[in-house]
Structure formats: structure tokens, C-alpha cells
Amino acid sequence: MCLGIPGRIVKIDDAARLLATVDVSGVRRQVNIACIVDEEYPVSSCIGDWVLIHVGFAMSRIDEAEAAETLRILTELGEAQAELEAIHLSAAQSEGHAE
Amino acid sequence: MKYLDEFRDGAKAAILVAEIESLIATMDVPRDRPLHIMEVCGGHTHSIFRFGIEGMLPKQIELVHGPGCPVCVLPMGRVDDCVNIAERPEVIFATFGDAMRVPGSRKSLMQAKADGADVRMVYSPLDALAIARKNPAREVVFFGLGFETTMPSTALTILQAEGEQVANFSVFCNHITIVPTIKAILDSPDLKLDGFLGPGHVSMVIGTAPYEFIANFYRKPMVVAGFEPLDILQSIWMVLKQIKEGRADVENQYARVVPDKGNAAALYAVSRVYELREFFEWRGLGSIDHSGVKLRDEYAQFDAERKFAIPNLKIADPKSCQCGEVLKGVIKPWQCKVFGTACTPEMPLGALMVSSEGACAAYYQYGGVRQHAAAE
């Protein structure tokens, strides 16, 4: 029950009772969106949003920019790692030449 | 699937593992005294076994599986209370599937159902409320279970029941809170921890500020982590980096889901509906002050504890079961005497073997047993 699953809001079913339909990998289900709407994000603005769903409630709007940032850090780590390996390799090779 | 697949990329995982290895190589950690990093949340425990993350890590890092599986920490007496409520002829007892097979002293909810009790598995508390609307002549009791992740959904369902005046709906509230639990672990003399992976989805509700005491007072690193393999590996790397640099901070690896300030609407619903209990009994950990919540007096009509006489007995766990020691990370699941023999997911003795988020079930299901048997 702690894992939750990402889904996309496709339809507002009942704006007063804060019910919307989400699409989770092709499966549709009604969820409550009370936790992800406020003055900044009115009900009407939710369509198309990716949300994390727990036990029938959208509990968090997934932040696209933050997701991209996490992946960017990981990519950079990879580049740094590759560079480090290249340095090690070239150091080993030049040692080899010196001998 | 978006937001899952990109955080399961094998090539990126290999890079992170290499980063972790080169970082730990500079840290002078003795091989016989590895760093102990606890993942507090059962969701993390599940992912760690499912994706074989322990096997990717260098020997100098040991993951300690924490108490964050709400089903697993439920004491046997509470299961008995559930069965007692469920066996009343007027009651429809609605529960998440996880809780169905947890053994009570007489029977589990599953066995109660087989014996004729009206126990129904629901996906959401809203489904339980819908059952109540459809069955006005019956009493529908929802088994409210979980940390702050699911606490708001139960609270919002109660507020909805109040709004609609659904009089035959109530909640048997067993919601628990994470912070006093982490504090109890930090104060436990059995345990020597070097850092924490923070529970991602609890934090999505409560934010990161409630963990500051871990860094400031106990001087332990805490990284709030997501649940995919790259999230977990990156969070371990962030914990290591803090240890290496002599820092103890609360950091947030899971910013795509966890806002530092948490979820205001969810916290508002929680504070309206619940108040802290003086103490709550945990399987394996004993009684922890202020670690559970109950319904406020204003919502007494939706409180199953007040609607029905509940014996609330304390029942000791079976003697052969070592769930408590596993929960505190003192022994590994496979070191329990009954693991995989008298206690299996099909016939569990202890709760850790029941839920897919329990350390024992995760070990059993994903072959951790074989790995360790081979290593020894």
C-alpha cells in the first residue's frame, strides 16, 4: 500500500466532490483529487497532469522538471565516470610507455 | 511506463554502483564492520529485494530493513480485534488485501471470511464507503492501516462520510506515525546505524522538516528516497557522500514527488480528523509513545472503537517467531529459526512473512535465501 503508482488525469468527473478519472497504463479508474488542488492548481487545470496514486487518492503531482533533473544528475555521473575511466586508462598506458 | 522505466535503466544503475564503489574505496571502511544504512520503509525493502540491490552493493555497505511495513508491525491483539468486529453478524469488514492473511491468535481475517464472516477486500477506503451507501442496513467497518501515506485518504473518506451523513460507516483506526518510530530506533541500544533512507511517500505528505532532529540531534544522514532502483542507489550514494564529508543533513532525492513542505491539503485533513494516542503497541518494538493516532471526539460516530466493544487484548507473538529482532535489524530474516520452514508466505507464522513489504516475504520471494546460503 506504500508504493503507489503514477497515472495521468484524463477527465474531471465531479468538480464539487473532487473526483477525476486517471489512466494508469491503459486502465482507467476514478480517484479523489482533494490533495492536489488548491488556489494555484484549480480542478480545471488538472487534466493531463501526472500524479502519484495511493489507495484511490491522487497524493502528489509528479514534477516533470524535478524528474528530469534527477535523470540529468545520473547522466552526468555517467559522463564523469567515463572520463575518470579514460584518465585511468591513459595513465596506465603512459606508465606502460615509460617502462 | 512513464516515471518508472527511466528510473530502472540498467546502464545507469551500473554507473551508480561504480560511483558507490569508488566512493567507498576512499572511505577506509573495515570489511568486518560495514556501514549500516536503514531503509525505514517497507516499500523500499520490497524494491531492494525485487531488484536485487543488496547484491549490487560492495561488502562494506549493509542495508538494515526497518519497521516501515504497517501490516508487519501490527500486534496480534489488533488482528484479534479485527476478527472480533468482523464476526459480528451486522458487520461488513472492509480491509486492504495486505492485512487479510496476518495471523491472529485464533484466526486471520481470511480464515474468518472462510468461516462465514463478511470480510471484503477493498483497494481504497472510498470503496468501503461505497459499500456502506449500498448496504444501509449493515454496519461497514473500514480497517484504517498505514503510516502518513494512507492516513490522509482515511481522513478524507471520514470527512466525506460526514458530509453525506453515512451513519453506518466507521473506521477501526490503526494508523501510525513515522517520527516517534524512528526516534525509538535511534534510542535502541541494539542498533548502530550510520544513516537512513527516508520513506518517500510518507515524506510526500509530511515533508522533510520533521526529520531535522535526526541530522541535528543524532547526527545521522537522512536521504528521502524514491522507490525505483536508480532512486535507491542514488540515495545510498548520497548517504555515503554525507558520511565521507562528515555531514549529517536531511536531503531529498525524490523531489519529483516529495515537496520539502509536504502536502498541505493532506495534513489539514489529518489534523482535523485525528489526534495522537498516548502510546501505541507495535509488534517487535513494544509500546512507543505518541506513535499512533485515533479519531477526535468530533468524529466519534465514525470510530469503530467507540461503536463496538473492542477487547483490545495484548497477545504475545508465538515463541518461535523472531519478527521483533528482524524488525529492529538485529538479525536477518534468514537467521530466524522458523524462516522458510514453519513460516512461509503460504502459511505465515509472523507478520513479516505476510505482506509483500515485509522483509521476510521479500527475502523468500526474491531468492535472498539462496543468495545468502550460497555466500555462507
Image (tube, grey):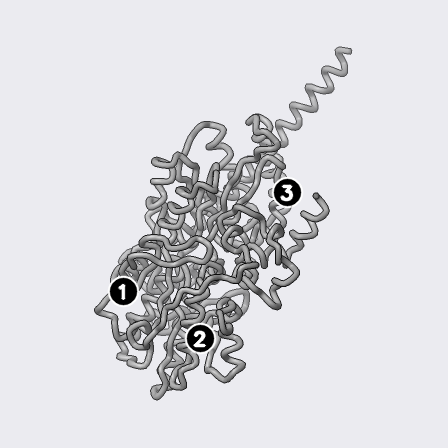
Q: Which mark is residue B273?
A: 1
Chain identity of mark 3: B
**Residue nearest the observer in this picture, A37 or B342:** B342
Q: Nearest to the eye among marks 2 and 1: give it.
A: 2
Q: Could you classify mark 3 by the number of other residues whose Cα lies within 10 Å: few (under 14), some (14-19), or many (20 or more)? A: some
Amino acid type of the residue that numbered disc 3 sits on in the rendered structure: Met
User: Gap between marks 3 and 2, in whole Å?
Assistant: 42 Å
Q: Secondary structure at mark 3?
A: helix
- Labels 3 and 1 touching (C-beta < 8 A): no
User: Gap between marks 2 and 1, in whole Å?
Assistant: 25 Å
> In the rendered image, which quarter contains the C terminus of chain B?
top right
Identify the residue at image location x=54%, y=62%. Answer: B350
Residue B176: quadrant of the picture: bottom left
Q: Secondary structure at mark 2?
A: helix
Identify the residue at image location x=71%, y=20%. Answer: A92
**Residue nearest the observer in this picture, B344 or A45:** B344
Q: Which mark is residue A71?
A: none
Chain identity of mark 2: B
Q: Secondary structure at mark 1?
A: helix
- Numbered-mark total: 3
Q: Which residue is mark 2?
A: B83
Q: Could you classify mark 1 by the number of other residues whose Cα lies within 10 Å: few (under 14), some (14-19), or many (20 or more)? A: many
**Residue nearest the observer in this picture, B3 or B305:** B305
Q: Is residue B203 above or below residue B343?
A: above
Q: Which mark is residue B56?
A: 3
Q: Position of residue B88 (x, y in %)?
A: 40, 82
Amino acid type of the residue that numbered disc 1 sits on in the rendered structure: Val
Identify the residue at image location x=39%, y=47%. Answer: B184
